[in-house]
């Protein structure tokens, strides 16, 4: 083993030893969410219901309405009168609906449209029949209402108010019927509670699962006193005994576990409604004609990092700089091959480790455990199927390209077709990497860490981006690969420690973990159904064919590692090493999600009801792990991001130098090309940081979707060009150009009219390019250049 290998391995095991050294430290006692209560001014009249109006609050009575002023010092009467007796208000946030009727039965519903100067109402179609004891909620774009009909049986009705011609439809009832005390929508599912003894029954409905029983409530839920919080919690007010005061409790919709919140001084509740991060409620005021109003609101503080956590993070970051500095001082940097492909001297196993590190970004480090926590292991099927696809890549694709001694994978398109195709595809690759991928990889982990620990998003982005720029620019491809090796050990070591910590923190240890996971079907792996809306084996086969096999040749980030190996045999072996790590690595990250499920099912009080599902693992890291270990695993999240970021920076600088600088500048020298690449590494990093900081001011979900759409719209055609070039002898430059243009145009049309889900754009674009490009090639002469070594055919 070389000195560099020993140095990298030594640094990695030093970090592992540090983790083991720190593990005996006691786990910190993370504070539970606190509950803030406040009395608001009394409303000068009887209150039937509440509705939010921005940051303010509306109170509705039988004959009028009031608005709370911004200072929460008093209520002002609004010039509004209900068209008929008002029986209640349902909704969430600014979207609320008035229940109108007579004789205590709802007959009509009106939407409340809030404005700066008050609000207006707009009536929906009348209910099919009048309903007593009404309850309502919103689920997506739909309004759902339940109540007791004239025949004494409950009904459940649904309408989409924003449709051009909305209409009521009846939905199936929960088993055993019974009048609902609450009705709540949360993340695509409907929850209803029904009075029962000793605790109310709770039922969950979803489109794919129908009605399913949930854990009964530990008492009697107050009528209408429920709301959704975060992405997976329901907040209820209930009485644990008939004489007890109402107390707030939460039900976690994934683990199906109840947790008590800190006690609140609530004596009686007449009407309640969601507001801000809690509930607003009314009670009878001592002064007769008024209605007393109070709020309970969940608050959660930041779990700030301790001094030892910061030391661990700083040691890790300085270590990455040290590796970059080592290669900067050791290498003469006179050769482009040294900077771009590590002098083609990278061992195949290190290239394979680096492939996995680059392919496992910080998004995966956070999102995969969250997915397994929420569902099961079905998405792990993608890893298993991908291994089969990688076998094909290792045998046919990678050795072919490695034998050509490329530095830019797009050089192949020039040799096989035309220089214009090479430069255009390279430019679009740079655009997608800088404009969407780098910014998302920087921003998402920074947001998750900031949500939990209080580290500012800007500082996280600057730390990850800045340190990655320095060691990548100094050390080139060798620094990228060897830091990847260290970073993989850091993040995998932290992941394994987290799993062990959770399992051994359970009262039943490993046995409890296995029993709970099996009982809840959390390790289900394969789904052989033909339902295209689910994560099935057939869907993953389709995905791997287009997202792994056919797109691998155009992925400069991954291909650059295989091009850095000694020969075509080692290039193929690096893919085998990548595949060998992918399966156990996948099981590790999905096991984190399962361990989180079992841990929080046993300790539901340790969760934060205000957070999203993706914040589950960061919450555990910050709230449960010992000081020092928290810093190490956050360093692991940094490592996951920095491994991918360094790969993108190095790849972008390689493309900019090889595909553009050396083509457009007169008399380029290797030294000038390397200097230009170093400058472009810094520029690429700064652009990525800039986009990430801009992204912090906008909706992450929309831009993340745009990045997926861009990859499909612009990248599929060039993946199809590689397929035509490598697997056919008839394809020519003219036909491929027509195929690329046709695929982009037709896929854009599918995007414009929203014909399919964005995840299908890539596959559609590749197929269109292959079909159109091959057919168009028959309109032009065969390629005149020799195709020897450019296709999979030996006699080409």
Image: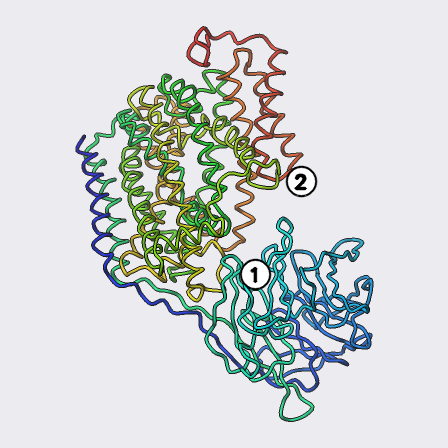
In depth, the one of 349 and 533 nearer the eye is 533
Measured from the top left, where is residue 160 in percent x and y?
73, 56
The residue at the point 25 percent across, 44 percent down is: 321
Measured from the top left, where is residue 31 in percent x and y?
38, 69
The single residue placed furthest to the bottom in the displayed view is: 287
| Badge 1 or badge 2: first in the primary sequence | 1
Residue 435 in view of the camera: no
In depth, the one of 15 and 27 nearer the eye is 27
Q: Which quadrant, please, contains the N terminus?
A: top left
Q: Secondary structure at mark 1?
A: loop
The residue at the point 68 percent across, 87 percent down is: 44
Label 1 CA crowd tier, 10 Å (few <14, some 14–19, many 20+):
some
Q: Is residue 741 above or below residue 261?
A: above
Tell me the number on the disc at residue 214: 1
Residue 770 placement: quadrant? top right
Mark 2, residue position: 754
Q: Secondary structure at mark 2?
A: loop
Q: Is residue 365 above or below residue 385?
A: below
In depth, the one of 717 and 533 nearer the eye is 533
The residue at the point 63 percent across, 71 percent down is: 195
> Between tags 1 and 2, which lies in front?
1
Residue 273 placement: quadrant? bottom right
Residue 567 in view of the camera: yes
* Image coloring type: rainbow
Measured from the top left, where is residue 263 in percent x and y?
47, 78
Tell me the number on the disc at residue 778: none
């Amino acid at each position: 083993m070389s000195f560099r290998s020993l140095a990298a391995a030594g640094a990695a095991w030093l970090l592992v030893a540090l983790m083991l050294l720190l593990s005996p430290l006691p786990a910190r006692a993370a504070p539970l969410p606190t509950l803030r209560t406040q009395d608001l001014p009394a409303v000068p009249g009887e209150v039937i219901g509440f509705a939010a109006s921005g940051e303010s609050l509306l109170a509705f009575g039988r004959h009028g309405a009031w608005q709370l002023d911004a200072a929460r010092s008093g209520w002002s009467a609004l010039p509004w009168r209900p068209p008929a007796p008002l029986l209640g208000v349902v909704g969430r946030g600014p979207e609320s609906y008035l229940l109108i009727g007579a004789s205590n039965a709802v007959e009509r519903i009106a939407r409340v449209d809030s404005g700066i100067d008050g609000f207006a109402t707009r009536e929906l179609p009348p209910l099919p029949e009048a309903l007593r004891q009404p309850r309502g909620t919103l689920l997506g774009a739909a309004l759902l209402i339940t109540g007791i009909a004239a025949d004494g049986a409950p009904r459940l009705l649904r309408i989409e108010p924003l449709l051009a011609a909305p209409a009521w439809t009846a939905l199936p009832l929960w088993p055993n019927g019974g009048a609902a005390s609450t009705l709540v929508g949360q993340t695509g599912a409907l929850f209803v509670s029904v009075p029962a003894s000793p605790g109310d029954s709770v039922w969950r409905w979803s489109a794919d699962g129908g009605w399913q029983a949930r854990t009964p409530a530990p008492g009697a839920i107050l009528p209408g006193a429920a709301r959704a919080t975060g992405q997976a919690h329901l907040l209820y007010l209930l009485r644990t005994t008939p004489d007890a005061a109402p107390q707030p409790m939460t039900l976690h919709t994934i683990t199906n576990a109840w947790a008590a919140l800190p006690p609140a001084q609530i004596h009686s509740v007449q009407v309640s409604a969601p507001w801000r991060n809690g509930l607003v409620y009314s009670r009878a005021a001592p002064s007769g004609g008024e209605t007393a109003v109070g709020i309970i609101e969940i608050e959660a503080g930041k779990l700030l990092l301790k001094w030892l956590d910061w030391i661990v993070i700083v040691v890790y970051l300085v270590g990455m700089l040290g590796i970059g500095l080592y290669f900067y001082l050791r290498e003469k940097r006179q050769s482009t091959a040294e900077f771009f492909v590590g002098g083609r001297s990278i061992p195949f196993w290190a290239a394979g480790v680096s492939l996995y590190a680059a392919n496992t970004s910080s998004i995966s480090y956070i999102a995969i455990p969250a997915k397994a926590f929420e569902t099961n292991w079905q998405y792990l099927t993608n890893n298993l199927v991908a291994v089969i696809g990688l076998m094909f890549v290792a045998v046919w694709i990678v050795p072919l390209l490695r034998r050509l001694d490329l530095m830019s994978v797009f050089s192949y398109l020039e040799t096989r077709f035309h220089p214009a195709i090479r430069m255009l595809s390279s430019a679009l690759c740079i655009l997608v990497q800088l404009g969407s991928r780098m910014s998302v990889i920087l921003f998402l982990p920074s947001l998750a860490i900031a949500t939990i620990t209080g580290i500012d998003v800007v500082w996280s982005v600057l730390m990850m981006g800045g340190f990655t720029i320095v060691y990548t620019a100094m050390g080139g491809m060798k620094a990228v690969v060897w830091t990847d090796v260290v970073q993989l050990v850091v993040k995998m070591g932290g992941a394994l420690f987290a799993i062990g910590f959770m399992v051994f923190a359970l009262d039943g240890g490993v046995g409890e973990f296995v029993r709970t996971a099996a009982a809840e079907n959390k390790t289900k792996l394969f789904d052989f159904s033909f339902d295209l809306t689910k994560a099935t084996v057939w869907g993953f086969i389709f995905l791997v064919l287009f997202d792994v096999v056919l797109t691998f040749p155009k992925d400069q980030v991954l291909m650059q590692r295989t091009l850095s190996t000694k020969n075509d045999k080692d290039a193929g072996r690096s893919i085998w090493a990548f595949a060998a790590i992918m399966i156990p690595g996948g099981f590790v990250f999905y096991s984190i999600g399962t361990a989180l499920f079992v841990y929080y099912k046993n300790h539901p009080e340790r969760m934060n009801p205000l957070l999203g599902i993706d914040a589950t693992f960061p919450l555990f890291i910050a709230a449960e792990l010992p000081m020092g270990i928290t810093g190490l695993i956050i360093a692991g999240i940094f490592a996951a991001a920095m491994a991918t970021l360094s790969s993108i920076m190095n790849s972008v600088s390689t493309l900019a130098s090889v595909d553009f600088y050396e083509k457009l500048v007169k008399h380029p020298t290797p030294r000038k090309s390397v200097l230009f690449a170093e400058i472009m590494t810094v520029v690429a990093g700064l652009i990525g940081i800039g986009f990430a900081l801009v992204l912090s001011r906008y909706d992450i979900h929309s831009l993340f979707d745009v990045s997926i759409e861009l990859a499909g719209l612009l990248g599929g055609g060039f993946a199809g060009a590689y397929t035509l070039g490598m697997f056919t002898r008839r394809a020519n430059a003219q036909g491929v150009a027509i195929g690329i243009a046709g695929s982009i145009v037709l896929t854009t049309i599918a995007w414009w009219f929203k014909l399919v889900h964005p995840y299908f754009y890539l596959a559609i674009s590749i197929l269109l390019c292959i079909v159109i490009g091959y057919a168009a090639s028959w309109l032009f002469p065969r390629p005149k250049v020799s195709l020897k070594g450019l296709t999979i055919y030996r006699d080409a």
